[in-house]
């Protein structure tokens, strides 16, 4: 039997993290199937066998997977960054250039469909107000009580809070290291992050009467932070006991509050990422071509599927009877999936990919650091980071 070659963390960093793409594609597909199933039930009534209906009905859990992946990816992407407060501004600018154009395009398409539906008397949904639209540009619509123009937009608001919150905490930690020293700063960080994690889990499940504003990402911070901790563990920054402790705390609260066990999906996903990295399977696990394709267009698929897929299903209901034969409904379902994927691919090619490429022109390093840095080839690790630098709604 050939001897297995042990890879160092730096060697592993050079791998293309296909597991991330595959898991991202699977999560996006789950959310798409969930919303299409809701549209079909609303249009044709119960249409799928009980077991399949149950699986489709839990597709919203793909969001939990997205949040864990986000934590891992963002922490990996800034692992060697100069975490100053100036970095926060540069990071926010780059993320905005990367995320906003597809987001705006999805919002504009939804508003156009609403306007057209009102003109044709096909809908009673009112056009969003100017204030509601403006709040979306700040990712603050839920904080301000306006609600999302598209139902899935709340997750993007949470993602933005995750990103900026994490970078801010890391920048504060660096300042504490400079003023208090590494040991004291580490103790402060452990206490603060542990308290934030515990509060997040308790607020999510209303344990012991703890709650939070529905627009604050603290409700899902614990899922995001599991992904953060996975990278810290595999890169040697902390012990795996920290990750195990988060799993135990989350499991205990889920059981105490009598929540269904599928609420532990974030634990499962973080454990999967940790196992994949430890076993050198980040380039092979969940790396089938269909999943990698879906992972590549997952942001566009997530943004546009509700606008396109729901309306396609509802339009089919205008042509077919409510008691249409189930094989025909299955054909509608398959066509809706294909249309959602096709639309996402077009949006990715026309909007998302150009914005992604343009965002990479903006360096996360300060002007002074770039001026003092010697000219050298781009390291492979930076190329991988660029490949991972995408959103995970």
Image: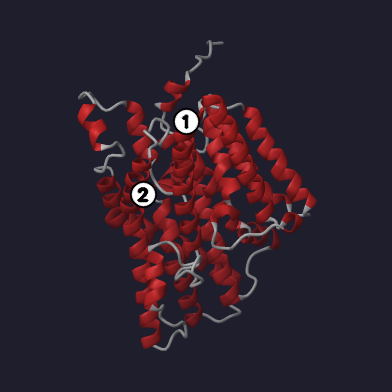
Which residue is rendered at x = 69% and y = 52% of the image?
202
Residue 295 place in picture, x, y as percent? 44, 46
Which residue is rendered at x = 47% and y = 63% of the image?
153
Q: Secondary structure at mark 2?
A: helix
User: Which tag is nearer the camera, tag 2 or tag 1?
Assistant: 1
Which residue is rendered at x = 37% and y = 70% of the image?
134
Front-lying residue, 393 or 329: 393
User: Label 1: few (<14), some or many (≥20) within 10 Å?
Assistant: few
Extreme residue toward the front, this view: 179
Horizontal relation, residue 59 to residue 257: left or right: left
Which residue is rendered at x = 34% and y = 64% of the image?
104
Q: Which residue is mark 1?
A: 179
Figure check: 19 above or below 120: above
Q: Secondary structure at mark 1?
A: helix
Residue 320 place in picture, x, y as percent? 51, 80
Q: Which residue is mark 2?
A: 92
Residue 116 place in picture, x, y as percent? 36, 81
- As drawn, the label of residue 151 is none
Front-lying residue, 99 or 85: 85
């Amino acid at each position: 039997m050939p001897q297995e070659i042990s890879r160092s963390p730096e060697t592993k960093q050079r791998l293309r993290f296909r597991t991330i793409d595959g898991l991202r594609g699977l999560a996006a597909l789950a959310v798409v199937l969930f919303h299409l199933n809701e549209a079909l039930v609303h249009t044709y009534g119960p249409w799928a066998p009980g077991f399949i209906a149950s699986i489709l009905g839990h597709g919203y859990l793909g969001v939990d997977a997205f949040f864990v992946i986000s934590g891992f990816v963002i922490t990996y992407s800034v692992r060697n960054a100069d975490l100053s407060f100036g970095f926060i501004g540069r990071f926010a600018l780059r993320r905005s250039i990367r995320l906003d154009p597809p987001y705006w395009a999805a919002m504009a398409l939804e508003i156009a469909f609403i306007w057209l539906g009102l003109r044709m008397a096909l809908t009673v949904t009112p056009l969003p107000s100017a204030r509601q639209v403006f709040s979306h540009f700040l990712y603050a619509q839920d904080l301000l009580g306006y609600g999302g123009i598209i139902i899935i937009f709340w997750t993007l608001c949470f993602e933005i809070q995750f990103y900026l919150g994490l970078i801010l905490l890391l920048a504060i930690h660096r300042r504490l290291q400079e003023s208090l020293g590494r040991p004291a700063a580490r103790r402060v960080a452990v206490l603060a992050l542990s308290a934030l994690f515990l509060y997040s889990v308790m607020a999510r499940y209303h344990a012991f009467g703890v709650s939070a504003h529905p627009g604050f990402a603290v409700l899902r911070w614990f899922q995001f932070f599991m992904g953060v901790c996975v990278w810290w563990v595999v890169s040697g920054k902390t012990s795996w006991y920290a990750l195990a402790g988060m799993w135990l705390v989350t499991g205990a609260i889920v059981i105490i509050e009598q929540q269904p066990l599928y609420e532990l999906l974030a634990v499962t996903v973080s454990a999967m990422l940790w196992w994949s990295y430890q076993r050198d399977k980040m380039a092979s696990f969940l790396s089938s071509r269909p999943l990698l394709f879906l992972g590549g267009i997952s942001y566009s698929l997530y943004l546009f599927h509700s606008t396109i897929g729901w309306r396609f299903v509802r339009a089919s209901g205008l042509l077919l009877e409510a008691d249409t034969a189930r094989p025909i409904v299955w054909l509608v379902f398959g066509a809706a999936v294909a249309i959602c994927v096709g639309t996402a691919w077009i949006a990715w090619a026309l909007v998302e990919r150009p914005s992604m490429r343009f965002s990479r022109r903006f360096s996360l390093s300060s002007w002074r650091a770039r001026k003092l840095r010697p000219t050298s080839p781009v390291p492979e690790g930076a190329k991988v980071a660029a490949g991972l630098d995408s959103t995970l709604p």
